[in-house]
Amino acid sequence: MSDSEAPTRIPSIDGKQDKAERGVTTKVTPNMDNAQRQRPKQFSHSFWDPKIAHLRALYFKITAMSIVLLIIVVWACLPVYWGSLWKAPVLTRNLRAWVIDRDGQALGNAVAGAIMNTTTSGIKQTLGWQKLDASMFPTNDDVALGVVDERAWVAVVIAEGATAKLAAARANGDATYDPTSLISVYYSQARNEVASGIYLPLTQTLLIKTLFQFNAQSTAQYLAGIAGNQTAIQLLARAPQTISTPAYFTLFNLRPYTAQVATAVTLVGFIYVIILSFFVTMSGAGAREVIAPYLTTASLIKLRLIMPIILYFPLSLIYSMISLPFKLPFGAKYTYAGGFFLFWVLNYVGMLSLGLATEFALTLLTQRFVAFFLIPFIVINVSVSVLPHELQPWFYKYGYGFPVFNLGQAVRTIIFNTKNHLGRNFGVLIAWAVLSLITVPIIIYVTRQREIREEQAKTLPDEREEEIREEQRRIDFGAGTTAQLSPSEERRVEDAERQDRGEKPLVA
């Protein structure tokens, strides 16, 4: 018999000689793992190879689950954007508009009356017109200031003595008479260029219709009154505009949307800001994989907060500088340099508010699902930035507390000199950043504690697993052989063998 097959006497626990030998004969043979031999080889199979059927099934399962989850996200989020636009045509009454009659005569009564009739006539698409007393705004400059201050979207002012001016021009044959000076329309396009494309055509259409009727009636009455009066007819020949177009209006765009490239920074650009911030988050996650397992929780929290704060600094500067060659009007409210610097600071704070939110989402959802967070995050922010809240259902007023709406409003102030909301805008952005600075460490701490517990559970001995390992060792190396005994057990076996031979044991 070979050494590995030789029987070995195992003494009893009480040290007495057993009546029969407790020998076990084993033979060490190679332990071949069939599963290991059948393991698929890399770079060696076609997609439909039966040997990778289980992997193919897993692939289809993961793909199907991803598509189902994406469909759920699309159906849950994209309707929010669609819903922000679809009610605009029927919500125009929410747009406050003023009509101020300084004339008080025929022209003023005709225009103001026609405008106010739209609020009670059942017309679906009209503005929220309010007739204000002229004493509330002593001058037209005061009216313009009220529009710029966003107290109204549009204001129609009938000039003082407008009817008398028309009559005097006809009577005197005033060739310098300007019919467009009788009515002034004030609005601020840069407040929201999309909204101006809604309320301004409504206002113009209403005025054109009203003035067409007034002019036709006024001309007919005047001509009937001077029939046979050659002098009056000759005077009309000197001022034909008093008959052809007795009254008309002039548009005053107080804050024109002069730079079309501004669209890139007032709306679409902020989608890019979210994507750039998200890219910093994901690249940081990839870079941390090599070092994060070896860091303490405190060090990991500091790393995840400090690095983005640093990286957003040059990234926001590069993003801001892209607008310089395209002549964005940074000098509309401040100096050109001051406006650009404020624009840069705004983008930096915006990246903090948006990017740190994605850091929180990454920790909560993990890299596997964080991409599904990006879609609703973009949709929810952009939906409240296209149209003013007055043209959206009440639900969208949440935009006042979200980053992209405040970024867009602040940019308009900087480059178009619209009403200054910078205090509120920066306040909201900073609040988002501070909220993330509080919640990100909390979620990191909770997640890290769970990872620590899981790691400890892996390293703790499992009794059942230890029994399985011991049994396998016995099978592999032979149960009862001295190779598997501790030194004390070996001495006891040797003493038992000496007793069998009649020799004195080594241990008393």
Image (cartoon, rainbow, N blue to C red):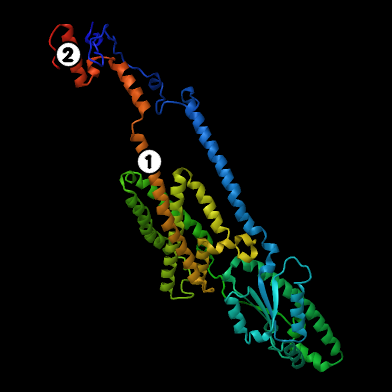
Q: Nearer the viewer, residue 263 or 3?
A: 3
Per the image, label 2 sits on a secondary structure element best described as helix
Can the viewer see residue 322?
A: no
Name the residue carrying label 2: 495
* Residue visible at 37% across and 19% down in the picture: 33
| Above or below: residue 469 compared with residue 108 | above
Location of residue 199 by image quarter? bottom right
Amino acid residing under circle 2: Asp
Can the viewer see residue 223?
A: yes
Quarter that holds the C terminus: top left
Q: Is residue 244 left or right of residue 383?
A: right
Say which of marks 2 and 1 sits in front. Answer: 2
Amino acid residing under circle 1: Arg
Location of residue 223 by image quarter? bottom right
| Above or below: residue 22 compared with residue 199 | above
Mark nearer the N terminus (2 vs 1): 1
**Disc 1: CA contacts within 10 A as few (<14), some (14-19) or many (>=20):** few
Mark 2 and mark 1 in contact? Answer it, CB < 8 Å. Answer: no
Q: CA distance from mark 2 to mark 1?
A: 47 Å
Which label belongs to residue 453? 1
Q: Is residue 239 left or right of residue 379?
A: right
Question: Where is residue 177 shown, x and y percent of the image?
Answer: 70, 87
Question: Where is residue 403 shown, x and y percent of the image?
Answer: 50, 61
